[in-house]
């Protein structure tokens, strides 16, 4: 279980995930060895963890999609185990209601999304159907959510050393050695510059300079997560809602500021807003929805689902109680079997004469 000092430590790492233990200890009124020991206990027991990944715009032009998956009876967990290994799948949830699984994934473009849904999910034994919606705008997401255990003064003392949680400001794409550095960093976001230098072949000075630049450009997203069942917010609910399109951006920004909201995304589908909220109890679902509609009367909730098992969160696999198991490093999706299947379909669509004497045209 977590005590108040654990909550303070997690909140401090949400604000400044790479701050040294001495600095965090000074802010919390503890010595560095105490906070280091507490963090080691939290990570070893799976109660808390830190992740880092490139912000979507910094990695490559990207499409964020929400895919609802229906499974054949008795095959849900087999399907989930397959999908969970895909490196571009950010979140994977077993949820209640009119779908079995909800997948959040990032794609290079719409063609790659179509290939994934048609030739990867569509070919999985146990998948009965799927429905896809694209996020036209991500108004807020989980890296910005805080436990809010620190005072304003404590947050101010921690915040200047970290770009974590800052809103994206644009910037160039990450390539080459920057991506190599981020991949090494993602295995342990708190590892030292000296350790990263050993892993990448760069000098410690170069590592520190590159990380400082990436933080200044808001090119990286850090997340310090706590097992939801032990967070004080044990219930996660997703709401599909509709708002007048002319007011969508204004309402989404106001909704995103609510304490309970972990995700607010504009969608391409019939319901143009998807919300994910962490709540205190199942009993609070109806009350939260009532408060939401009362505060924003333009919003109409069309559907809702309770997360039964957050199988994957931010690229990390969790057990049914929300305890951390292991990371699946986030990366671009590449599946030769799906590419070959797509190439064969393209040959068929070109017609019988186009493929005479040739094998399937494979993508470069």
Image (cartoon, rainbow, N blue to C red):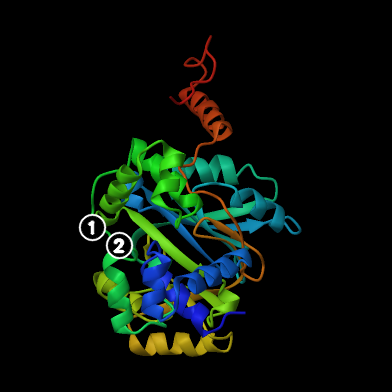
| Position of the N terminus by quadrant | bottom right
Q: Classify residue 98 as left or right of residue 67.
A: right
Q: How busy is the neighbourhood of tag 2: few (under 14 within 10 Å), some, or many (20 plus)?
A: many
Where residue 30 appears, x then y in whole percent? 44, 79
The residue carrying mark 1 is 169
Where residue 10 appears, x then y in whole percent? 47, 73
Q: Residue at x 53, y 81 (%)?
A: 233
Label 1 sits on a secondary structure element that is loop
Q: Classify residue 236 as left or right of residue 292.
A: right
Is residue 318 visible in the rendered structure shown here? yes
Is residue 263 visible in the rendered structure shown here? no
Q: Residue at x 52, y 78 (%)?
A: 6
Q: CA distance from mark 2 to mark 1?
A: 11 Å
Where residue 145 appears, x then y in whole percent? 40, 73
Count of numbered circles on the image: 2
Up the image or down, 232 lies above or below 361; here it is below
Q: Earlier in the sequence, mark 2 or mark 1?
A: 2
Q: Nearer the viewer, residue 83 or 266?
A: 83
| Position of the C terminus by quadrant | top left
Where residue 304 appears, x then y in whole percent? 52, 75
Q: How busy is the neighbourhood of tag 1: few (under 14 within 10 Å), some, or many (20 plus)?
A: few
Picture quadrant where residue 316 is located: bottom right
Q: Nearer the viewer, residue 276 or 290?
A: 276
Mark sitting on residue 347: none
Q: Classify residue 150 as left or right of residue 280.
A: left
Mark sitting on residue 163: 2
């Amino acid at each position: 279980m977590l005590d108040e000092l654990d909550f303070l430590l997690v909140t401090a790492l949400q604000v400044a995930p790479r701050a040294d233990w001495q600095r965090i200890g000074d802010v919390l009124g503890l010595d560095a060895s105490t906070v280091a020991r507490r963090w080691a206990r939290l990570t070893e027991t799976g109660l808390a963890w830190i992740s880092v990944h490139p912000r979507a715009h910094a990695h490559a032009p990207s499409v964020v999609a929400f895919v609802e998956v229906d499974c054949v009876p008795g095959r849900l967990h087999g399907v989930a185990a397959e999908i969970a290994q895909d490196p571009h799948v950010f979140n994977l949830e077993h949820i209640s209601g009119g779908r079995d699984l909800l997948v959040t994934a990032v794609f290079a473009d719409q063609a790659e999304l179509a290939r994934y849904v048609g030739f990867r999910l569509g070919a999985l034994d146990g998948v009965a159907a799927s429905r896809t919606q694209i996020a036209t705008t991500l108004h807020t997401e989980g890296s910005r959510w805080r436990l809010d255990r620190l005072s304003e003064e404590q947050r101010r003392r921690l915040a200047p050393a970290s770009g974590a949680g800052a809103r994206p400001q644009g910037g160039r794409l990450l390539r080459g050695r920057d991506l190599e550095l981020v991949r090494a960093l993602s295995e342990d976001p708190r590892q030292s510059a000296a350790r990263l230098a050993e892993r990448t072949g760069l000098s410690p000075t170069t590592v520190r300079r590159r990380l400082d630049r990436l933080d200044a450009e808001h090119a990286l997203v850090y997340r310090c997560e706590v097992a939801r069942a032990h967070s004080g917010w044990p219930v996660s609910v997703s709401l599909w809602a509709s708002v007048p399109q002319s007011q969508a951006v204004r309402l989404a920004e106001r909704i995103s500021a609510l304490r309970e909201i972990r995700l607010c995304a504009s969608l391409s589908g019939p319901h143009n807003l998807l919300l994910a909220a962490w709540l205190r109890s199942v009993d609070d679902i109806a009350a939260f929805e009532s408060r939401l509609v009362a505060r924003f009367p333009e919003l109409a909730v069309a559907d809702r689902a309770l997360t039964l098992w957050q199988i994957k969160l931010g690229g990390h696999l969790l057990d049914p109680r929300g305890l951390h198991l292991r990371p699946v490093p986030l990366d671009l999706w590449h599946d030769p079997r799906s590419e070959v299947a797509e190439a064969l379909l393209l040959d068929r669509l070109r017609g019988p004469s186009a493929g005479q004497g040739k094998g399937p045209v494979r993508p470069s």
